[in-house]
Image (cartoon, helix red, strand yellow):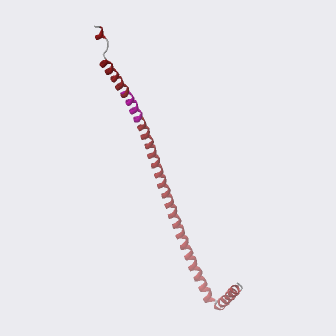
Amino acid sequence: MEQSKKPSNLDKTSHLAHDAIDTVTNATYQVATKIVDKGDELHQVANKIVEKGDELNNLAHDTINKATTATHEAIDKLTEKKEELINAEQEMIMRYSTYVRDNPKIAIGIAAGVGYLISKFLNNR
């Protein structure tokens, strides 16, 4: 009867197998938990990257909108200045035309003098 109280080799092997399975299961659970934790961390990092991407996208759109607005304002001002210059040119032409009609001898003298000065200037080069 003493032999029946003593565990058999099969019982010892079974016990060792159960212990090994428990150890592997425990280790697998710890690894899986760490993987899930890392997955959560990666998910949080990905969310932060998406948020920063959205911020950069909005910043880029704001910058483009500001640049577009500034360009349109510059075009409007240049168009206004162009019209002012055209009006000033037309007014000067009208005034000089009137002056030349009213004072033809003086106008011819001025034109001859300017022509003479230009020819001297160009010949001295």
Q: Is residue 63 above or below residue 90?
A: above
101 sits to left or right of 40: right
**Range shown magenta:** 25-36
- Locate residue 59, reporting x and y percent: 49, 52
- Quarter holding residue 44: top left
Closest to the observer, 14 or 19 = 14
Q: Is residue 98 above or below residue 79?
A: below
Q: Is residue 5 above or below residue 120?
A: above
- Count of all numbered marks drawn on residues in the image: 0
Q: Residue at x 45, y 45 (%)?
A: 49
If the image is split into quadrants, where does the C terminus sit? bottom right
- Locate residue 73, reporting x and y percent: 52, 64
Closest to the observer, 104 or 125 = 125
Main SS type for the magenta part?
helix
- Quarter holding residue 42: top left
Q: Residue at x 40, y 35 (%)?
A: 35
